[in-house]
Amino acid sequence: METSVRVLDDASHVAVALTPMRRRLVAELDQDESATSLAKRLGLSRQKVNYHVRALEKAGIVELVEERQRRGCVERVYRLSARRFLVDPSVLGSPTVTLRDRFSSAYLVTAAARLVSDVAALRERAARAGKKLLTQTLETEIRFDTPQDFEAFTDELAREMRRLVKKHSSPKKRGGRRYRFVMGAHPSIKRES
């Protein structure tokens, strides 16, 4: 079953996906399709496309939808296993940034990388257990006139966060489930249309 995002956490699977031919096949596979019809549409040999699609299947990037008899052969129909793919940052090694400067872009990137890795692992565990993963995302944009305004907002946000954590955090002796909250801010990127 196709998911919206799949995090690739195995270096060999990432390597499979990065060859130019396989990137092209992933980009072109926008509907359920056989290697034969994909090859015909792209003007490539069926054998070449089939070889690369099988490698993508083994890596979990495409998945088999159905097998059907066609002209005495079995035709395998594939689709992408997700709409988007992300590489787990830990595939390239653990980040070594240990500073906790809340204004450091290096720390923000490290926290975001850990967030991707942690949520990917939790999604896999929840899927194996047949359960839903309870998460929350807060996202907004705000405009500041000066760096001092940004710093004042950050200070107030930190104070409010400490107050809310103290108010809503259950004592360790009562059990419950721990949650990690990550908030970060960076200048908005103007996306080109």
Image (tube, grey):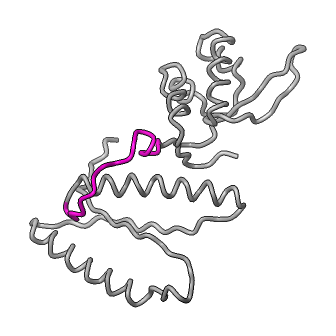
- Considering depth in this image, is 165 or 151 the residue closer to the camera? 165
Location of residue 86 in the rendering, given as x and y in whole percent from the top left corner: 48, 43
Count of numbered badges drawn on the protein: 0
Whether residue 63 sits left or right of residue 165 in the image: it is right
- Considering depth in this image, is 93 or 140 the residue closer to the camera? 93
Location of residue 52 in the rendering, given as x and y in whole percent from the top left corner: 62, 20
Residue at x 34% of width, y 48% of height: 95
- Considering depth in this image, is 192 or 149 the residue closer to the camera? 149
Q: Is residue 89 above or below residue 110?
A: above
Q: Quadrant of residue 54?
A: top right
Which quadrant of the rendered structure holds the C terminus?
top left
Location of residue 147 in the rendering, given as x and y in whole percent from the top left corner: 10, 65
Q: Is residue 130 magenta?
A: no
Location of residue 131 in the rendering, given as x and y in whole percent from the top left corner: 68, 64
Residue at x 53% of width, y 88% of height: 173
Tell me which secondary structure the magenta stretch mostly adopts. loop
- Considering depth in this image, is 101 or 24 the residue closer to the camera? 101
Q: Is residue 94 above or below residue 49?
A: below
Q: Which residues are magenta?
A: 87-103
